[in-house]
Each structure stands twice: as structure tokens, then as C-alpha cells.
Image: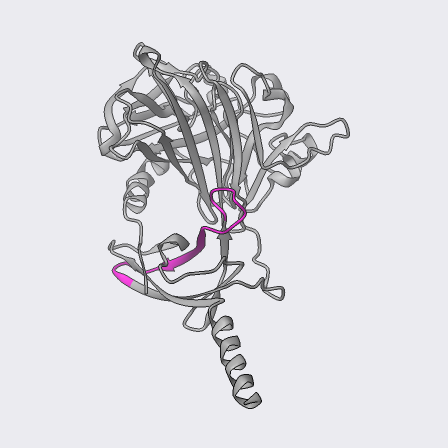
């Protein structure tokens, strides 16, 4: 009898142990004709019907080789929601990955080399700029100068971005010579010594323009900042090492005819990418227009400042807008920071585009949310200072159709 009980307990132990792990096969298909590099792959844990435990570790392999990956908590409840990894995949091809999920933390797991940097920091008396995960304040409270780097900041090996914590919510740009992570050292405020060492720098002065893909209200036939807001906030969703997602949100926005709504903007940056994916979500159906686009870099600069880089660009009804030009990145630091030639681009899928506009400072899309109360688009830029990049308007503009086609053909992910 004791022997039978022991066997029974052993069997129960095996069942309990097996219930704490689950291995799934993930088929990733590139239906596009062209090869893809550093293609993002997302496995949503909520879609796995047989998963009955909280996942604490994950291992991804392909043909027996480890694939760098990360577990991401997207809603902030301290429990993972997604598995994320990157893959190179040929056109018209399918790759199969094995994803092993476990309820146990893997203490001996290999750490993944960080290819992403994320920071939301506050100013303090000790000048240490501690990291925080969220900053939230009444809409009329001015915290712009209390946030170090003036807002949440993200970086890949190719590019860096920050989104201002104020009524503008402009996207600012950090360009660099070398493909590496630099913002932990420069923090967007590159010193003269760092410049001499080859570090990058802030490359955009937006002023009253739309900047590079900033999301704005649309009123009186022009972009409008987010001034009538009940609560303004920024949140770090996930920090890498392969992707970062940050949230910029406005609660109690006063819309047309005093209609109130909430708006959440999610910015995703992937390792190996220069472009930024933007998803804007609303809490209700809105029959109103918004806008995004790119500014005309150097449109107001003199010829000496432009350094021969003519301000030029376009906005097309197929959803692509771009510009190229040269101007000072910071009007208050002309002696330190020289004029910077850059290219910018925005791609908005046609389903959201209601009109195209051009004014003295901008190339613009007038956009409206889809049936799912959201708008999605992509932002990209290049800096002439990059060693391995684009150095003329012709080169930059010629690359953008391929970029638009690439982001328009995401891989198809199926789990078994």
C-alpha cells in the first residue's frame, strides 16, 4: 500500500511539474517577396488557450540554436503578456521556432546584450536623475523642466528619440555617427568633449513645426497642441533588450463640442531599426480629425546655415511624406552645435488618411481613427553624420518606398 501511495505521489508530482512548463511551436511566415532583417515577432500569451500558469521565464530556439528574446509585461500588472524576439527571414519563407514557457525563473539564463535604451528620469537635488516608470500630473501642471531630458527617451543602435512631456508632445531626434548605444553617456545633452570623441547629438529644432511624426490635434485647418487636457502622463512599458515600448497619454481631452475623450499613444522601437512604430488609441469612437507629418527642415534658415542642403520634400496621397534639409538643432547652442543635415519621413496607411496639406513649415496628413478607435503609422529619420547611412536628399527619398513596403508587410505568426 505504501508503495502504491508513493508511486501515486510521484505521478502527481510529475503532472504538477509538467503543468508548470509549456512548449509551443511558432511558425513565422514572410509572405512578402523581399528578405527581412530584424523583423519583430510577438507571441501573445493570452492567445495560448492551454496556458494555465504565470510565465516567469522563456527560452526560444530555432533548429536547436538559442534565439535572444524577452518577456514583456504590457499592462503593468507585473505579469508577462508577450514573448518578443527578432528574426531574419527570406522572402516567401517560413521559419519555425520552439518557445518553451516556464513558471520558474531561469537563474542561469544567458543575459541578452542590450540593443535598446529606455529612460524616464526626474531631476533631483543630487543630480543623479533617478529612473522612474511613470510620471503623471494635472494637465495644467508644467513639469517639462522637472523631467530629465524633458521626456521619455528611447534609442536603438541607429537612432534615438524623445517625446516631450508638455502640451506639444513633439518627437525630438538624436543622430549619431556610429551604430551603438550612446544616450546613457550623453543624455541628449552632448558636451563639447563628447562631440570631439565622435558622439552623436540632438539633430532637430522643431520650433512651431510638427517635427518628425508628432501627433497633433487638427483645428481651424492647422495642427494644434494638446492644451485642454485633464491629466497628462508618460509610462515606460518595456525596456528591452530587444524592443522598447513607451506610452504617452492624455486623459480628459476636451474635444469638439466639449466631447471628452482619453488618448493613449504607444511608441515602439526595435533593435536594428531606425524607424519608430506609433499606435494611437482612443477610448471612444470619434468623428474628428487629427494630424501628423514632417517639418520642412531648414525652410527658414539662410543659405550659410543650410550648407548647400536645399530644403525639400513631399507629401503623397499614398501615405508617404518626407523632407530633407539642414538647420541648427538648438538655437541656443549655435557656438557648440553646428547645423545638422537630416532626412525625415512618415508613413501613414491610406485607411487613416483623409487629406494632405502643405504649409510654410510642414508636410502634413490629416488623419482620422479607424473603426477600432485607433490610428497606426511609422516614423523614421536619418542623420548625415552617420557613417553608414544616407547623405543626400536623393539617397534618402529613394529608400522610402522600400521602407513603406517593408512595414506594410509584417510577418504572419501562428502558434501550435
Query: Could one spot residue 56 in this view of the protein?
Result: yes
Q: In the rendered view of the protein, which quadrant contains the C terminus? A: bottom left
Front position in the image: 283 or 206: 283
Please, which colouring scheme is shown? one colour
Q: Is residue 346 above or below residue 206?
A: below
Q: Residue at x 35, y 25 (%)?
A: 292
Q: Give the quadrant of residue 153.
A: top right
**Residue 26: % across, % down:** 35, 63
Compared with 367, 32 (above or below) is below
Which residue is drawn at the image coordinates 24% and 56% (left, top)? Answer: 31
Residue at x 50% of width, y 21% of height: 231
290 sits to left or right of 136? left
Q: In the displayed structure, would residue 132 be above or below residue 20? A: above
In the rendered image, residue 373, in percent from the top left (x then y), is placed at 30, 31
Residue 179 position in % (x across, y down): 53, 46
Residue 40 at least partly seen: no
- In the drawing, does residue 190 fall left or right of residue 173? right
Residue at coordinates 34% horizontally, 30% vertically from top-left?
322
Q: Residue furthest front?
A: 1
The spot of residue 65 in percent (x, y) is 47, 70
Q: Total marks drawn?
A: 0
Determine if the magenta segment contains residue 364.
no
Quadrant location of the N terminus? bottom right
Residue at the outermost right position: 126
Q: Nearer the viewer, residue 261 or 393?
A: 261
Magenta-highlighted residues: 73-93
89 falls in the magenta region:
yes
Amino acid at each position: 500500500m505504501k508503495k502504491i501511495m508513493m508511486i501515486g505521489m510521484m505521478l502527481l508530482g510529475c503532472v504538477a511539474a509538467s503543468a508548470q512548463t509549456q512548449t509551443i511551436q511558432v511558425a513565422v511566415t514572410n509572405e512578402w517577396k523581399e528578405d527581412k532583417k530584424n523583423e519583430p515577432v510577438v507571441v501573445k500569451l493570452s492567445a495560448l488557450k492551454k496556458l494555465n500558469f504565470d510565465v516567469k521565464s522563456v527560452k526560444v530556439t530555432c533548429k536547436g540554436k538559442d534565439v535572444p528574446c524577452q518577456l514583456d509585461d504590457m499592462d503593468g500588472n507585473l505579469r508577462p503578456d508577450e514573448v518578443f524576439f527578432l528574426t531574419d527571414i527570406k522572402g516567401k519563407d517560413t521559419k519555425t521556432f520552439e518557445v518553451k514557457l516556464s513558471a520558474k525563473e531561469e537563474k542561469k539564463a544567458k543575459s541578452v546584450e542590450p540593443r535598446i535604451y529606455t529612460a524616464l528620469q526626474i531631476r533631483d537635488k543630487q543630480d543623479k536623475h533617478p529612473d522612474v516608470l511613470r510620471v503623471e500630473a494635472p494637465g495644467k501642471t508644467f513639469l517639462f523642466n522637472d523631467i530629465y531630458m524633458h521626456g521619455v527617451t528611447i534609442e536603438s543602435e541607429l537612432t534615438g528619440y524623445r517625446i516631450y512631456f508638455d502640451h506639444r508632445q513633439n518627437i525630438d531626434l538624436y543622430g549619431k555617427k556610429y551604430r551603438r548605444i550612446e544616450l546613457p553617456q550623453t543624455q541628449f545633452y552632448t558636451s563639447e568633449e563628447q562631440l570631439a570623441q565622435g558622439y552623436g547629438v540632438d539633430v532637430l529644432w522643431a520650433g512651431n513645426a510638427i517635427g518628425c511624426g508628432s501627433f497633433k490635434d487638427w483645428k481651424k485647418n492647422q495642427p494644434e497642441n494638446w492644451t485642454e487636457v485633464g491629466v497628462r502622463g508618460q509610462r515606460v512599458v518595456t525596456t528591452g533588450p530587444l524592443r522598447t515600448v513607451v506610452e504617452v497619454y492624455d486623459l480628459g481631452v476636451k474635444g469638439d463640442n466639449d466631447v471628452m475623450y482619453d488618448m493613449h499613444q504607444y511608441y515602439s522601437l526595435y533593435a536594428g531599426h531606425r524607424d519608430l512604430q506609433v499606435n494611437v488609441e482612443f477610448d471612444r469612437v470619434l468623428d474628428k480629425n487629427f494630424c501628423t507629418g514632417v517639418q520642412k527642415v531648414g525652410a527658414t534658415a539662410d543659405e550659410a546655415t543650410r550648407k548647400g542642403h536645399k530644403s525639400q520634400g513631399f507629401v503623397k496621397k499614398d501615405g508617404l511624406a518626407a523632407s530633407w534639409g539642414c538647420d541648427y538643432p538648438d538655437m541656443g547652442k549655435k557656438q557648440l552645435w553646428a547645423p545638422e543635415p537630416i532626412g525625415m519621413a512618415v508613413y501613414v496607411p491610406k485607411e487613416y488618411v483623409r487629406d494632405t496639406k502643405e504649409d510654410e513649415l510642414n508636410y502634413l496628413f490629416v488623419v482620422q481613427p479607424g473603426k477600432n478607435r485607433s490610428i497606426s503609422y511609422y516614423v523614421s529619420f536619418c542623420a548625415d553624420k552617420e557613417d553608414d547611412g544616407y547623405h543626400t536628399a536623393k539617397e534618402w527619398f529613394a529608400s522610402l518606398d522600400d521602407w513603406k513596403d517593408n512595414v506594410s508587410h509584417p510577418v504572419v505568426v501562428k502558434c501550435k
